[in-house]
Image: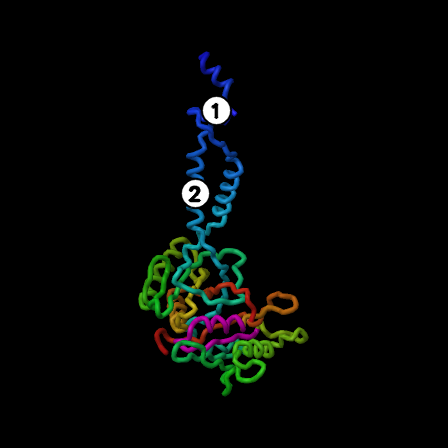
Amino acid sequence: MKKYESKRGAPFAKGDMTPMIDMTFQLIAFFMVLINFAAEDQNVRINLPASELAKPPDKPLESAITVQVTKKAEGGTVIVGPEETKVEGLLTLMHREAESIRKEDRVVGKATIIIRADRNAETGLVQDVITICQKAGFKLFRLRAEQKEART
Amino acid sequence: MKVRNVRRHDEDVELQMTPMIDIVFQLLVFFIMTFKIVTAEGDFSIKMPQAYESGDPSDDQPLVVVVTITARADGGLGDVIWASESKPLGEDAPYRNDPFGELRYRIRQYVNDDGTGKSTAAETEVELDCDRTLHFQHVMSAITHIKGYIDDKTNERVNLVEKIRFKPHPVGSS
């Protein structure tokens, strides 16, 4: 068994590395494919309401802005992109968003506002958000819900 | 040159596996750590009348049902009232304590969704009049029950009323 002795002379078992590396690469490929970079706009502080009819959209929406609404215990704030504000400051933010849409030669009225409101957020606050977005020129709104398998 | 040639013919080149496996495990750990299971999300589109529209918004919509949802003091679900009826939904069998179940039943009745007659769901519009403090999940339940249902036999989604809007409130009012 001279072949399996190290140069120093001590015997050691030389395992076949190929299957292990195969498996490891498989695992890496699996996690790489599944990693979801689009999850950036999903805030951990927001627990979406569940609905059995909620289906992911067939195609991604053209120019969508996600507006997140937190529950009262979290401050009842509104989050647009990286910025968090009380509802009073939302109009400025939405005007800015509308401005950047116009700069890209797109129509504000065709941009969709996706509202991700916490399940315990106040309905009045959600309605305020919609009204303020309308003041900034937005017309299309979507309420986001989590998919639920259970049937009622 | 002679020495090298001899070496090449006699033994294989040893591939250094250790750094590669190190890196591969690093990558593996990175992807496992950043992996987050994301539940699928879906959207409901709602139709909002322009806040400063002139005239009664129900002028061009003859079939508007107003569903009122009140809130308890803690924001929980209070009463669900169909078209300003005196009695809230969910009081009688078989829909006792299931106001949204009865809401769906009433909607299906209202739009003739029995498979025989012509469904009027396309022309119908539902206006939700919710208390400000109501928790949003109850509004989502109401929207779910108004928008449609999943057929027990075919397991397919049946659409009911697509047009849902909130009753306009001035910002900050109760």
Identify the amino acid type marked 2.
Leu
Q: State the count of labels.
A: 2
Marks 2 and 1: same chain? yes
Please determine whether, in this image, residue B158 is positioned above or below residue B23.
Answer: below
- Is residue A6 on the magenta stretch? no
- Is residue B135 on the magenta stretch? yes
Q: Tell me the element at label 1.
A: loop
Stretch of the chain drawn in magenta: B123-145
**Residue at image point 47% right, 57% down:** B38
Side of A23 where A107 appears, left or right: left
Relative depth, front residue between A26 and A3: A3
Identify the amino acid type marked 1.
Val
Report the coloring of the rendering. Answer: rainbow
**Residue at image point 47% right, 76% down:** B128
Q: Tell me the element at label 2.
A: helix
Outermost residue on the top side: it is B2
Task: State which chain disc 1 sits on.
Answer: B
Residue bearing the label numbered 1: B13
**Residue at image point 40% right, 56% down:** A101
Task: Tell me the distance, in whole angstroms, between the alpha carbons under discs 2 and 1.
Answer: 27 Å
Relative depth, front residue between B125 and B148: B148
Q: Tag on residue A67?
A: none
Q: Tag on residue B27?
A: 2
Rendered-image quadrant of the C terminus of chain A: bottom right
Q: Mark 2 or mark 1, which is nearer to you?
A: 1
What x and y, as percent, mark residue B34?
42, 50
What x and y, as percent, mark residue A150?
55, 67
Outermost residue on the bottom side: it is B86
- The disc, 2 or 1, on the residue closer to the chain's N-terminal end is 1
What x and y, as percent, mark residue B18?
43, 34
